[in-house]
Amino acid sequence: MLPVDDVQASDIADELLVQAPQIGYLTISNALQWRLQYSRVIEQAGRIEGIQRLT
């Protein structure tokens, strides 16, 4: 479930057929990646100018 349209998905599939990834690499979901990025920002709220903690 990639956040891409049909053309981009086809391009990715074509590339994978030509150059397959090595076995053993792990990835995380886009949703998890966004949550991790937001949690890092939230941790810095109040410590870095321009990032405010809202309660």
Image (tube, rainbow, N blue to C red):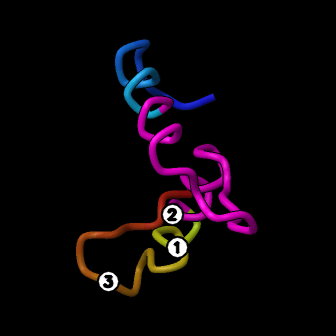
Q: Residue at x 41, y 79 (%)?
A: 46
Q: Are marks 2 and 3 in contact (CB under 8 Å)?
A: no
Q: Are marks 1 and 2 in contact (CB under 8 Å)?
A: yes
**Viewer-side residue, 52 vs 28:** 28
Seen in the picture, residue 10 relative to 54 is either above or below; the reply is above
Give the residue number, with chain letter if any, for mark 3.
48
Q: Residue at x 75, y 68 (%)?
A: 24
Compute the Cα span from label 2 to label 3.
16 Å
Residue farthest to the bottom? Answer: 47
Q: Which residues are magenta?
A: 13-38
Relative image position of residue 5 (x, y in whole percent):
41, 16
For mark 1, does the 10 Å Cα neighbourhood hold few (<14), some (14 to 19), or many (20 or more) residues? Answer: few
Q: Name which residue type carries label 2.
A: Gln
Seen in the picture, residue 29 relative to 36 is either above or below; the reply is above
Give the residue number, with chain letter if any, for mark 1.
40
Q: Name which residue type carries label 1.
A: Arg
Relative image position of residue 48 (x, y in whole percent):
32, 83
Q: Name which residue type carries label 3.
A: Ile
Compute the Cα span from label 1 to label 2.
5 Å
Q: Secondary structure at mark 3?
A: loop
Q: Secondary structure at mark 2?
A: helix
**Viewer-side residue, 54 vs 9:** 9
For mark 3, does the 10 Å Cα neighbourhood hold few (<14), some (14 to 19), or many (20 or more) residues? Answer: few
Give the residue number, with chain letter if any, for mark 2.
37
Q: Are marks 3 and 1 in contact (CB under 8 Å)?
A: no
Compute the Cα span from label 3 to label 1.
12 Å
Q: Earlier in the sequence, mark 3 or mark 1?
A: 1
For marks 3 and 1, give the one nearer the viewer: 1
Choose top left, top right, bottom left or bottom right for residue 51. Answer: bottom left
Residue farthest to the left? Answer: 50
Q: Residue at x 58, y 45 (%)?
A: 30
